[in-house]
Image (spheres, helix red, strand yellow):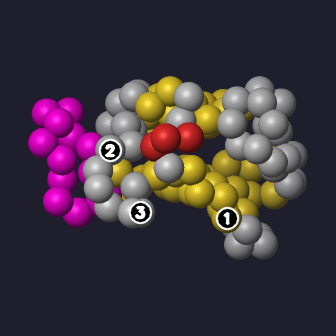
Amino acid sequence: EMLRSLVGSEMCIRDSSIYGDRLKLAGDSPEVGLTLRSVETGDEHFYPAADMLVNSGQRLCFVPGFAFGAGEWEAIVCTQFTPTYHLYKEPRYGTLTFTVI
């Protein structure tokens, strides 16, 4: 499974991290990046690789720049990364659903 967990510092303006495997945001597709989406409202926030504080195979760390509203959210990672650094031709996706109380 690509995504395992999301850990936030007060889940607001401070940094948040996603942990998993093969997460590194890499590739030339315009879709490559992290999208945070509210399941209830459809509100989306997109973060390209350049916005990551940490962009590694096991961790993505970023500053959301907004306060998460209560409810269900999805973190959608899109990447062409492979451990051999021979990028996939097509992007692949991983999704993690989490709840903000």
In the rendered structure, the answer to whether residue 78 lies left or right of residue 44 reads left
- List the residue tagged with mark 1: 44
* Residue at x 32%, y 37% (from the top left corner): 22
95 lies above or below 38: above
Front residue of 22/32: it is: 32
Work out how far the residue at label 2 is from the one at label 3, CA to CA, in angstroms. 10 Å
Region of the chain picked out in magenta, as a range: 80-92
Query: Which secondary structure dominates the residues rendered in magenta?
Result: loop
Q: Kindly indicate the quadrant of the structure image that contains residue 20.
A: top left
> The N terminus is located in which quarter?
top left
Work out how far the residue at label 1 is from the one at label 2, CA to CA, in angstroms. 21 Å
Q: Neighbour class for label 1 at 10 Å: few (<14), some, many (≥20)?
A: few
In the rendered structure, the answer to whether residue 45 lies left or right of residue 23 reads right
* Residue at x 82%, y 39% (from the top left corner): 12
If you read the primary sequence from the N terminus, does the residue marked by circle 2 or circle 3 appear first?
2
- List the residue tagged with mark 3: 31
Amino acid type indicated by mark 2 = Ala
The x and y percentages for residue 40 are 77, 70
14 lies above or below 48: above
Amino acid type indicated by mark 3 = Glu
Q: Neighbour class for label 3 at 10 Å: few (<14), some, many (≥20)?
A: some
Amino acid type indicated by mark 1 = Glu
* Residue at x 57%, y 50% (from the top left corner): 47
Front residue of 29/38: it is: 29
- List the residue tagged with mark 2: 26
